[in-house]
Image: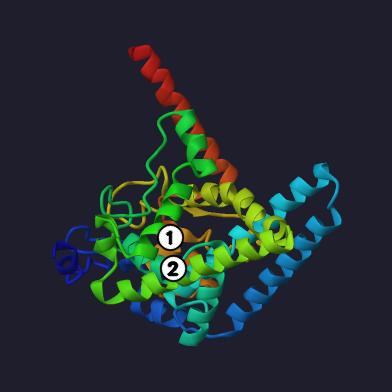
């Protein structure tokens, strides 16, 4: 009941809850928000076409590198990176901002969810909780705690906690036995639909595995599953950069980080490096986040020049904490 009642109150910017009254969106005027939140199908279809083309090109690299392990592994890593970066359009579709057409958001979201092994409806509701309780240490289901050791850091990058969570999602979703955290962000009325989607996905994966074994085919293994797994550390590093090390407070200007990246990454990650801007106004489509950045940049506390800079800072802080711990021992 507490989770349901909390949704009745919004913070200063019209977001958050009475448990976690988020602030920051007030820096965006109503006029500017109205200008930027216009939705259209064109940019999303263009970005999707570019992403599919990138999949075709990098997938071709895997094909031509077949038989040469020294070339095939790097090719699969590049291809896998392009696959996991499809998290961005999945994310946009969950907000209904990738396209103007609702059916297109759902169709593309379901398809990408199947490809990336992230059930679309489940992610949609989980992600809504992340936006409601951004950086709340108990209520944000996607909070990434700051690593206190180098071992913890590399464990996070390699997805040591991510993969068990993903497998657990598929298992619990298939049986309909959700845990207490999931029950907070999955309303009773949608759990049946969420479970149906997950069961269909599990059936699809089992069918692909069975067909691969029956026909002795390695296509799904080398052109989907292995690259998908190999690319995940890249996405883990990106996701860590979005909030890890930022304030664990309800201030969206301080609890989320924007990262300035090269045009290729910005294209393939659908402008999501403008992450503070997205949290300030999640109704603004991805293609308008650059303009929103120009409007709010002076107010942002965490703006970094690239993901490498973010991780150098995280590793530097981990090293400092380790030195202090040794001195105190």
Circle 2 Cα neighbour tier, 10 Å, few/some/many (<14 / 14–19 / ≥20)? many
| 322 displayed left or right of 53 | left
Q: How many marks?
A: 2
Q: Estimate the x, y position of residue 81 in percent, counting from the top left.
A: 65, 55
| Residue to which mark 1 is pinned | 170
Residue positioned 76% across, 51% down in the render: 75
Q: Is residue 119 visible?
A: yes
Of residue 46 and residue 236, the one placed in the foreground of this image is 236
Q: Estimate the x, y position of residue 24 in percent, counting from the top left.
A: 32, 62
Q: Is residue 271 visible?
A: no
Residue positioned 52% across, 35% down in the render: 154
| 47 displayed left or right of 31 | right
Q: Estimate the x, y position of residue 122 in percent, counting from the top left.
A: 39, 67
Of residue 28 and residue 267, the one placed in the foreground of this image is 267
**Quarter placement of the C terminus:** top left
Q: Estimate the x, y position of residue 115 in percent, counting from the top left.
A: 58, 66
User: Circle 1 — which element?
Assistant: helix
| 62 displayed left or right of 248 | right
How far apart marks 1 and 2 lie (CA) works out to: 6 Å
Circle 1 Cα neighbour tier, 10 Å, few/some/many (<14 / 14–19 / ≥20)? many
Mark positioned earlier in the residue sequence (1 or 2): 1
Residue positioned 75% across, 46% down in the render: 73
CB atoms of marks 1 and 2 within 8 Å = yes
Q: Which mark is residue 263?
A: none
Of residue 132 and residue 204, the one placed in the foreground of this image is 204
Residue positioned 71% across, 60% down in the render: 223
User: Circle 2 — which element?
Assistant: helix
**Quarter placement of the N terminus:** bottom left
Of residue 203 and residue 161, the one placed in the foreground of this image is 203
Q: How is the image coloured?
A: rainbow
| Residue to which mark 2 is pinned | 198
């Amino acid at each position: 009941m507490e989770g349901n009642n909390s949704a009745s109150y919004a913070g200063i910017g019209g977001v958050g809850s009475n448990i976690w009254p988020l602030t920051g969106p007030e820096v965006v005027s109503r006029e500017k928000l109205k200008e930027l939140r216009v939705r259209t199908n064109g940019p999303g279809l263009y970005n999707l076409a570019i992403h599919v083309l990138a999949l075709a090109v990098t997938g071709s690299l895997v094909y031509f590198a077949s038989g040469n392990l020294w070339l095939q592994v790097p090719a699969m890593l590049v291809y896998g990176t392009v696959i996991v970066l499809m998290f961005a359009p999945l994310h946009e579709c969950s907000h209904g901002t990738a396209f103007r057409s609702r059916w297109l958001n759902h169709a593309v979201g379901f398809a990408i969810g199947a490809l990336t092994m992230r059930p679309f409806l489940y992610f949609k509701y989980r992600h809504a909780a992340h936006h409601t309780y951004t950086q709340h240490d108990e209520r944000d289901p996607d909070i990434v705690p700051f690593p206190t050791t180098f071992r913890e850091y590399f464990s996070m990058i390699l997805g040591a906690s991510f993969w068990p969570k993903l497998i657990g999602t598929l298992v619990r979703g298939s049986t309909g036995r959700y845990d207490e955290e999931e029950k907070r962000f999955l309303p009773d009325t949608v759990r049946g639909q969420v479970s149906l989607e997950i069961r269909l996905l599990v059936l699809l994966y089992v069918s692909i595995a069975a067909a691969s074994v029956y026909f002795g085919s390695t296509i799904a293994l080398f052109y989907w599953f292995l690259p998908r797994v190999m690319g995940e550390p890249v996405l883990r590093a990106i996701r860590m950069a979005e909030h890890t090390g930022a304030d664990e407070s309800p201030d969206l200007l301080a609890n989320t980080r924007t990262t300035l990246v090269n045009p290729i990454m910005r294209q393939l990650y659908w402008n999501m490096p403008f992450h503070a801007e997205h949290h300030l106004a999640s109704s603004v489509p991805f293609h308008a986040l650059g303009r929103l950045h120009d409007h709010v940049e002076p107010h942002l506390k965490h703006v970094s020049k690239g993901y490498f800079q973010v991780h150098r800072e995280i590793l530097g802080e981990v090293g400092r904490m380790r030195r202090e711990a040794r001195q105190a021992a």
